[in-house]
Amino acid sequence: MTLGAGPTVPARPEAKRISLRRASVWAVALVTVDAFYLNEGWLAAIVGLGMLLGSPSPAAIAKHSEQSLRHLARVAIFLAAALLVFGLNWANNLIAERRFEMLITSIKAFKHEHQRYPAKLDELVPEFLDHVPRAKYTLGFSAFHYDALPDYHNLFYVETPPFGRPAYKFEKNERWYLD
């Protein structure tokens, strides 16, 4: 009877090396989509939370293995992207609020001067404004909307898509939210 060496244990595959370049590309995509198109921050919050929950343990970091340090760097890249999204969304909403106030003032001045509200925002140019501004620097939800109907005149913009629309009723001289 021949004694065999016994069953062989398959070699443990090496962990795939974490690509910081790929993480950076995805982080740029996150900022582009969530800050400059969606302008919400939900996607960045989910990714940031996922990165925090999946970050390496302090024991793994203490070993200073290349893989754990690369993993930590990837977490840092995505957290920085998420913070950038929140900062850009805040700045865009601040810009929109200031422009909103400027448009309200211009529409009221138009009403005072012409004894009527403008039929469209373009009537404010060039007497009251150089141009009708965009609400925000985003690809979607970047315009002001003006409803000029016989009984009421409203101005609004989208602060947080798809809801969260600050509005102004000119006949009642009051601010409100559409939803």
Image (tube, helix red, strand yellow):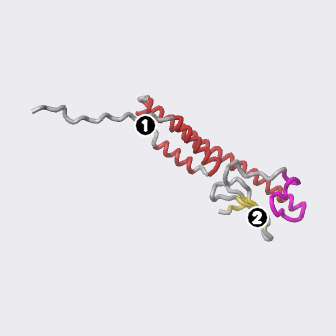
Q: Answer with the quarter of the image where residue 113 lies.
A: bottom right
Image position of 12 (left or right of 20)? left
Which residue of the protein is positioned furthest toward the right in this rendering?
113
Q: Is residue 59 above or below residue 43?
A: above
Which residue of the protein is positioned furthest toward the left in this rendering?
1
Residue type, numbered disc 2: Asp
Q: Is residue 157 above or below residue 22?
A: below
Residue sitting nearer the eye, 133 or 97? 133
Q: Which residues are magenta?
A: 109-129
Residue 130 within the segment the image draws in magenta: no
Q: Answer with the quarter of the image where residue 60 lies.
A: top left
Q: How far across and how far down the image is residue 100, in percent?
A: 75, 54
Secondary structure of the residue carrying tag 1 is: loop
Dot 2 or dot 1, earlier in sequence = 1
Q: Is residue 12 above or below residue 146?
A: above
Q: Are marks 2 and 1 in contact (CB under 8 Å)?
A: no
Q: How far across and how far down the image is residue 136, in percent?
A: 71, 50
Task: State which quarter of the image contains the C terminus.
Answer: bottom right
Q: Is residue 56 above or below residue 38?
A: above
> Residue drawn at (45%, 29%), measured in percent from left and top?
66
Q: How far across and how far down the image is residue 108, in percent?
A: 83, 59
Task: State which quarter of the image contains the N terminus.
Answer: top left
How many marks the image carries: the answer is 2
Residue 120 within the segment the image draws in magenta: yes
Q: How far across and how far down the image is residue 19, in percent?
A: 49, 35
Residue labelled with disc 2: 147
Secondary structure of the residue carrying tag 2 is: strand
> Residue drawn at (70%, 62%), measured in percent from left and top?
176
Instruction: Please tell me whether mark 2 or mark 1 is closer to you in this view.
Output: 2
Image position of 139 (left or right of 12)? right
Residue type, numbered disc 1: Ser
Residue labelled with disc 1: 57
